Image (cartoon, helix red, strand yellow):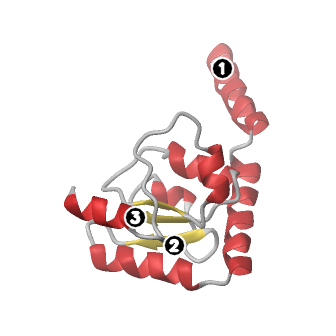
């Protein structure tokens, strides 16, 4: 708790513990960081990618299904503060244009694989399979 308070007091890092609408925060962010031990399909990463925000996440199922290392963000080893900090430093050392490109790449992935029309089509296809069985 003390370390988080110190980070929150710094000029370069802002910690938001719980918010109702993330869009404004993601629009102002250089990246989303999600250090996790395991995820399903992380909504936070989906939301960040849809908002053109690059991502730093752990290389665990769920996160690694969305983040392509060096394409739309960076992956780090699970339970490793060393690789997490290295990935965060890597993304922050990029130029604003390069970070923006990572964000655009993430948005393109969302549009290609996770758009509403694609998800609805998948659900309809599954329903049709059951109806035809």
Q: Is residue 12 left or right of residue 120?
A: left
Residue at position x 71%, y 24% from top?
A: 124
Q: Nearer the viewer, residue 128 or 49?
A: 49
Secondary structure under the numbered disc 3 in the rendered image: strand
Q: Nearer the viewer, residue 16 or 82?
A: 16
| Residue 98 image offset from top left, x and y in percent | 70, 80
Residue at the far left: name it: 2
Mark identifier at residue 127: 1
Q: Earlier in the sequence, mark 3 or mark 2?
A: 3
According to the picture, the residue beneath numbered tag 3 turns out to be 58
How many other residues sit within 10 Å of disc 1, few (<14), some (14-19) or many (≥20)?
few
Of marks 2 and 1, the one in the foreground = 2
Q: Earlier in the sequence, mark 2 or mark 1?
A: 2
According to the picture, the residue beneath numbered tag 2 turns out to be 74
Secondary structure under the numbered disc 1 in the rendered image: helix
Circles 2 and 1, Cβ within 8 Å, touching? The answer is no
Q: Quadrant of the C terminus?
A: top right
Marks 3 and 2 sit apart, C-alpha to C-alpha, by 8 Å
């Amino acid at each position: 708790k003390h370390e988080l308070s110190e980070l929150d007091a710094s000029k370069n890092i802002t910690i938001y513990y719980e918010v109702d609408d993330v869009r404004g925060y993601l629009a102002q962010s250089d990246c989303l960081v999600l250090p996790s031990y395991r995820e399903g399909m992380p909504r936070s990463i989906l939301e960040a990618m849809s908002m053109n925000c690059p991502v730093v996440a752990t290389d665990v199922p769920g996160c690694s299904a969305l983040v392509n290392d060096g394409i739309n963000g960076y992956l780090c080893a699970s339970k490793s503060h060393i690789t997490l900090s290295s990935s965060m430093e890597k993304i922050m050392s990029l130029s604003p244009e390069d970070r923006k490109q990572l964000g655009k790449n993430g948005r393109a992935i969302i549009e290609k694989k996770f758009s509403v029309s694609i998800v609805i089509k998948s659900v309809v296809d599954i329903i049709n399979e059951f109806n035809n069985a």
